Amino acid sequence: MTIGIGLLGLGTVGAGVAQILATPQGRHPLVAALALRRVAVRDLQRPRPIALDPSLLSADPEAVVDDPAVDIVVEVMGGLEPARSLILRAIAAGKPVVTANKAVIARYGEEIAAAAAERGVYVLIEAAVGGGIPIIEPLKQSLGANRIQRVSGIINGTTNYILSRMADEGAAYTDVLADAQRLGYAEADPAADVQGGDAADKIAILAALAYGGVVPRSAIPACGIDRLEARDVAYADQLGYGVKLLAVAEQVALAADGAAELDVSVNPTLVPRDHPLAGVHGVNNAILVEGDPVGRVMFYGPGAGAGPTASAVVADILNIAGIRQVSGVGSSGQPAPLDPLLAAGSWRPCRLVDPALTRHRNYVRLRTSDQAGVIGRIGTCFGDAGVSLQSIVQFKPQAGGDGAHAEIVVITHEVPESAFRAALAAIEALPVVDSVAACLRTL
Amino acid sequence: MTIGIGLLGLGTVGAGVAQILATPQGRHPLVAALALRRVAVRDLQRPRPIALDPSLLSADPEAVVDDPAVDIVVEVMGGLEPARSLILRAIAAGKPVVTANKAVIARYGEEIAAAAAERGVYVLIEAAVGGGIPIIEPLKQSLGANRIQRVSGIINGTTNYILSRMADEGAAYTDVLADAQRLGYAEADPAADVQGGDAADKIAILAALAYGGVVPRSAIPACGIDRLEARDVAYADQLGYGVKLLAVAEQVALAADGAAELDVSVNPTLVPRDHPLAGVHGVNNAILVEGDPVGRVMFYGPGAGAGPTASAVVADILNIAGIRQVSGVGSSGQPAPLDPLLAAGSWRPCRLVDPALTRHRNYVRLRTSDQAGVIGRIGTCFGDAGVSLQSIVQFKPQAGGDGAHAEIVVITHEVPESAFRAALAAIEALPVVDSVAACLRTL
C-alpha cells in the first residue's frame, strides 16, 4: 500500500525529506511505501538542491493539500501564514499533518490540536524542536509514567554556537555574531535566535507535552544573549561555569483545581562544568528531562540542518504510516479513534506563575567604586532582603579600566525572585555602586 | 476502560511498577486506566517494599498469566526460565507482554518475536536496555528514516561505576569492585557485568532494532574490565582519553543479498575526552546512534534502579494501552494487525563479519627491556604489517619497578584487525619485548 506525500516547501528541510524518500534502500522498509506526489514551491523556476520530476512541482500549495493522491501533508515552508491555514485545511480534509514549524505550533497549537482532535487526524511535530533529536516522541511515548519536574534545554543552535565561540576565544558577542552570519550559522536578521524568541517557541511546545496542557507562548519571559558581555563568560569560566542559553519549564506547584503551575522562561544561564548540559557545544542541542521516578534523562544531537531535521520529519511520516496499518484509513466524516499518546492531547490546565513568585539562583555583576567596605555593604543589602549568597568575588579590573572602579560578581543560592529584586534595588541605591552591569541565572 | 495488569515478579523493578500504578496523580492520565490485578511472587510470606492487597499475590506465575482479568503481562522476574516460557504462554493467550529481561530477549528474541507476530501481540522491551533512558522506542519510532552506521553505548552501569572510580581515585579494579559490592552497585557474583556479558546481551538487542534483523548473541565477542589494570586507566588519562566499557554495533558492509554485515563487540575502549560518551560517569548509561542523515544523537540517563526501570516498563504498558484505543482488543483467534514500528519485526538478514576482517583503532601496552632502539624495532614491526600508528610513548616505570624494564604504549590509527594481530605476533617474538601487557580499543 503506497502512501502519498504532499510537501509544502522545498527549502533545506523539504529537499532533505525528498532526498530520503527518493533513496529508501537501507532505511526502514516503510520508507519505500511512501511516494512523493506533489510539492508546493514559491517559484517554479528556481534551481533546486535535488532533482525532482518537474510535474511534481506546483506553485499552488492549496492544490497540493487538496490533491486526492496526497494522503499526508508535510508542512516545511515555515512562517505563520499561509502555513497555519494550510495545516488547518489539511486537517479539515481529514489528512494527517507533519510539520517542522515551531512558530505556528507555539502560537496556534491549541487551535490546530482542537481541529485535529475533532477531525480525528494526527498532527506530528518532532522536527519542530531539537532538529534531529528524538525528543517530542519520547516525551509523548516514553515518559508518560513520570511526574515531570523540569525540562531544561539548549534548544537554539545559533546561540549555542555563538556562546561556544565566545567561551573558546574570549571574543565579543558582536564579533562572533558577524562571523556566524558570514558562515551561515546565523540569519541576516538574527533577532529570533539571539533574543530568545525561537527558544521560547520551543520550550512552549516541550512544556505543553511534558505537562499535558496549553502553555501561553506570549506569556513566556525570554531574555537572549544579545546583551551578554565577554567578561561575564570569562568570569563564569573562572568560577567553574559555562554560559548557555537555557530554556526551562519547571513545575512549581499543583493547584487545588489540578492545574500545573509552571515557571517557564529563557535566560542566559551559568551551568556548572560537571552538569550534563555543560558539554553541549557548537550547533548541538540537548534537552534534559527530570521526572519522578525516572530521574534525569538527556537527549542530545544536531539541533538543525537539512539531514537531521528531515530525519525527524520522515520519522513522523513513518509513525502515521505505521498506525494506519492498525486503524485503517478511517471513513470520511466519522472521526477515527486516535492513539492518545501519539495524538498527545491536553489533559490538564497549565498556568504560568507570577515571575515574582519564582525561585532561582542568580549571577550578578556590579560595577562599584574601588574602596574598602563595598563588599560588606553589598552583602548586607542581600542579607537584609533575605537573599542567601554562595559567593562574592571581586575581579581584577579589566585592561583599559580606570583603576577607580571594581567589578564584583555575586552568585546567590536559590532565592525568591521578589527578594532578589528587592536586594538589587537596594544595591543600586548605594552611592558606591555605579550599576548592576549584568544579571544572569545560575543552575 | 480499565486495563488489567499482571505482574510477574515483585523485586526492585516490580515494586517500582506497582508504586507508579498505585499513584497515578500527575502522570499521564492513561496510567489511571491501568489496574494491577495479580502479582506472581516466589515467596508469599516475604516482606515487600510496597504495601499490596495480599489477595493480589500468587505463588503461581502461570495462574497470573492465565487470569482472565489480566490483559497485559509484565515480566520483571529476570532469569531465563521460567521467564521465557511465561512470555510465550502470555503470547499464546493473545496477551501483550512487557519485559525488562535482556537475557531472555537477547537469547530468545527471535522465537518470541515469531510467536508474537503470529499471534498478533506486542512484546515491548524498553526496560531491557538503558534502564530509564528512552532508547528502544526512539530506535523503533524516531530513527527509521536513517541508515544506521553505528550504535555505541555505555550500557552497563556497574562497570561504568567501577571505571569512573578507577579513573578518579587511581584505584585498582579489585579494590573498587569489592567496594562496589559492599555498596550494592555490583552483584555478589559480578561475572555478567564485569566480563561484558550483560553489555553483549544489550548490544544484541540494540543492533537487532537498529539494523532490522536478528543478531546472534552467542557470536558477539565480549571482553570485560576484569583484567583491566589501573595503570592503563592512568596512561589513557595522560594521553587525553577516558576508559569506558563500550558495546558497539557497526555496519561494515551491505552484502549482495541485502544483508547488513555487522561488527558487534564489547570492549574496554579509550574514549577521547571531548567525545560525548566521555562525560558519562558513575552508574549512568548513554547510547550514541550515528546515522544518515541524522548524524549523531545521544541518549543519556540512569541505566538501572527501581524508579528509572519502572518508568520504562510503564511506558511500554502505556504504549500498548494507547494503541488498543485505535485497534480495539482484537478478536480471539484472528491475529490483529500490528503497528510495524511498535512491533519492530525483522526486515532484513543481519550477519556478524569475521572479526579478523574488521577495522579498529587500538591501544597496546608493551613491557620491554629498557634499552635504546626498542621503540624503533616496535615501530618497524607495526610498519611491516601495514599498521599505521598515531603515537608511541614510553612511560616512566611505575614505583616498585626494577628499573630494567620500560612500558611502551602504542595507539594505532584505524587498521585491519588481521594486520594488527600479525604485528602483535611479530612484536611478541622480539627478544627485547617481555609481553603484550594490555590491549584495548580506541575510539
Image (cartoon, coloured by chain):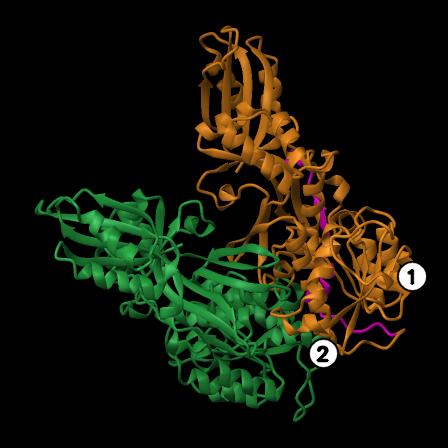
Chain colours: A orange, B green
The residue tagged 1 is A63
Q: Which residue is farthest bottom?
A: B333
Say left or right for A212 vs B62: right
Which structural element holds mark 1?
helix
- Residue B410 is marked as none
Q: Is residue B21 visible?
A: no
Residue A253 magenta-highlighted: no
Q: Percent position (x, y) of residue B362?
A: 33, 56
Amino acid of disc 2: Val
Give the chain of mark 1: A
User: Picture coordinates of residue A316 (x, y %)?
Assistant: 70, 63
Please check the rendered image and state whether residue A339 is part of the magenta-colored stretch, yes or no. Answer: yes
Name the quadrant of the N terminus of chain B: bottom right
Within 10 angstroms of label 1, few (less than 14), some, or many (20 or more) residues?
some
Question: Which of B346 and B157 lies nearest the eye of the viewer?
Answer: B346
Q: Which residue is located at x 27 percent, y 68 percent? A: B188
State which region is magenta. Answer: A334-358
SS majority, magenta: loop
Identity of the amino acid at label 1? Ala
What numbered label is drawn on residue A326? 2
Left or right, A52 with respect to A141, comes to right
Q: Residues within 10 Å of mark 2 (few under 14, many from 20)?
A: some
Label 2 is found on which chain of the structure?
A: A
